[in-house]
Each structure stands twice: as C-alpha cells, then as structure tokens.
Amino acid sequence: MECARSWSSKNPGHRYEVLTDHNDLYYLETHFGPKGLNRPDIIYVYRSLTATIIKADLLRYLVMYVEGGAYADIDVEALRPLDNFIPDRFNEQEIDMIIGVEIDQPEFKNHSVLGPKSQSFCQWTFACKPRLPVMLKLVDNIIRWLNQLAKKQNVPISQITLDFDDVISGTGPSAFTGAILEDMSHRTGRKVTWDTFHNMAESKVVGGILVLTVEAFAAGQGHSDSGSHNARTALVKHHFHASGWPNNHRRYMHPMFGEVERCNWNAACVAEWDRKRTEFDALPLEEQAKRIAVKQFADAFNNPTPKGKAVPNSNPNPIPNPIPKANQNP
C-alpha cells in the first residue's frame, strides 16, 4: 500500500486507479465489447488465459491504449512527481510516449540464454497518450503469438505452458521493446536499433517517444550502469514485491551450475558459467548423469527437505536439453 500511496502523495492533482482480478474483465468488456471497440478476439483470449503474468502484461497495454496516462506496477514507488518525467528541454506537446531503459547489456546479445533479455525498455512503468497505435499493435502481436503457441502445443490457450523466457519474449520487456523499436522505425523512416540507446548519457526523443536513461525507472539494479535511487534522475523504485511469477514459469537451470541470471550480467561470472557448461556438455552422457546424481545427493544432504514438504522437481530431465539459440532483438 505504501507504493500506491506514494503516487497519490507525489501527484495530488492526478487520479490514481487500480485494476484488480475483480474488475478487470468488466473493464475490458466495457471498452472492447460490442459497445466499445468491438474486439471479441481480445476478450476471448483474456478470458481464456490462466497465466497470471500474461494477463497482467496484456491488461496494462489494453488500459494504456484506452486511457493513456502513466502506468506503474503495484510494487513501484514514486520517488518524484509525474511533472518530473519530461525534462525541461523537451516540448511536452511533441511527446506521445515516455519510456525508460531497463537492461542495457548488448554485449550479451548473442548469448544463448541472456541474449533476448540483454537490451530492453522497462514496462513496469511507462506513460503514453491514449489511442496510441503502438499499444494496439503490441496487443495484436500478443494475441497472434498466443494463438500460434496454442496451435503449436496443440492445446487451448488456457492450457499453454510457458517458461520464463517465453513470458519475457511473448508479452514482457522483449515484446514491448520490439514493438517500440518497430514503431520508432515507422515514425522516423529509418531503422532504429538498440545502438541508439546504448550507454545513453542523456534522455532523447525518437519519433515522438521520449526515452529516459536507465536511472529513471530502473535504478539500483547492479548492472547496465543503473546508478542508485539517490540520484536526482531516479523517478521510481521497483520493490519487486509482486514479482513472484517466475516461480510459475521457470528459468533455464543447468542441473550442475544453476541459472546464469544469478551472475546479474557480470561478464566474468557469465564467462565462467559458459566455460563450465561447455566442458560439462563435452562429457559422455553417462559421466554427465553420474555427476548430476552426485550433486543431487550432496544438495539433498546439505539442504534436507523439511518433513512433510514435497521436493520440487525443478529439472525433471537428468541430462540438460540443448539451450536454444537466442532470438536477437533488433
């Protein structure tokens, strides 16, 4: 609640609204039903979804298309008023959207696991004018992706299975970033890539979209030169209280070396994880299985499961599947 109160206290002249599981469908039926934009496909897909994080991502884009204004996740604290979001040197009338850098680590763009997540805009906080075409284009991309995924898995949308990277690339920051870059390219008449936003020292406007430096919305991450929340340019603080969704959509976890994300984009750490993984993958399958069994025994001995508590099967395959090649962001 403190995060929610921060927006009201910092912005007394603005209306603050919260959509919940109790009023989200009513909102969508009102604005996208027969008396609204008449998009039964959107309502059908939203009704069908069981993955909470996918619904949350989709809902924010739909609301921002209809309402415009500023969006923030429920666990994001306002550090500065909304009036501070646009630097004085820019003309507010010429800005259609305000976004900020989240991850700026393009040196990892070809990494098999980190690649798709290495360069992205933040979508836990952003602002835009109502009826902005890029928002509806993003929604259409998501609807198409969900239908294709359901067809590929040969299940209804309600039964699709998603891992962590599916969420990031399908509806999360990677999907958001891809749509924004495509829209910028359309607006400017030239291909806009992440190079435009790498190592930004100052905020910039591209095709009517204001891109703030990483400190604005994503300070204190420990990577991407994100600085700290004490900086004057830090506008919000994400507390990650509502970020339990990765528990339901697991990351790639190597059975011996765990998640490479634990390196938090540290180059030496990632290189060491890659080296050990490569050496392990070169071993005969029998030797791999033996080492995994030894590790599992040691882990169970050092971290005994409390009586009556089930042991989570985070990696049901004793031998790791090959890591798919990264889908590089533009």
Image (cartoon, rainbow, N blue to C red):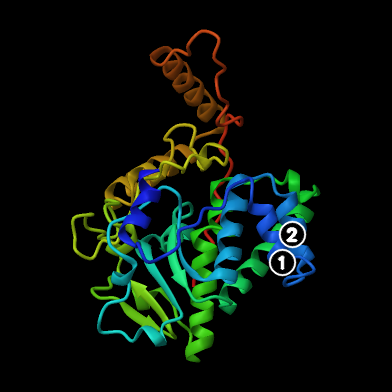
Q: Which residue is mark 1?
A: 32
Q: Which residue is mark 2?
A: 43
Whole-angstrom CA distance, mark 1 to mark 2, is 7 Å
Crowd tier of the residue under label 2, counting other residues whose Cα lies within 10 Å: few below 14, some 14–19, many 20 or above: some
Instruction: Give SS at disc 1.
Output: helix
Q: Residue at x 37, y 48 (%)?
A: 3
Q: Where residue 108 is drawn, which disc sits there?
A: none
Q: Is residue 183 above or below residue 17?
A: below
Q: Is residue 65 above or below residue 149?
A: below
Q: Is residue 243 above or below residue 314?
A: below
Q: Is residue 34 above or below residue 146?
A: below
Instruction: Give SS at disc 2.
Output: helix
Q: Earlier in the sequence, mark 1 or mark 2?
A: 1
Position of residue 95 measured from the top left corner of the image (x, y, whole percent): 41, 82
In the rendered structure, the answer to whether residue 291 lies left or right of residue 90 reads: right
Q: Which residue appears farthest toward the bottom when viewing the image?
A: 189
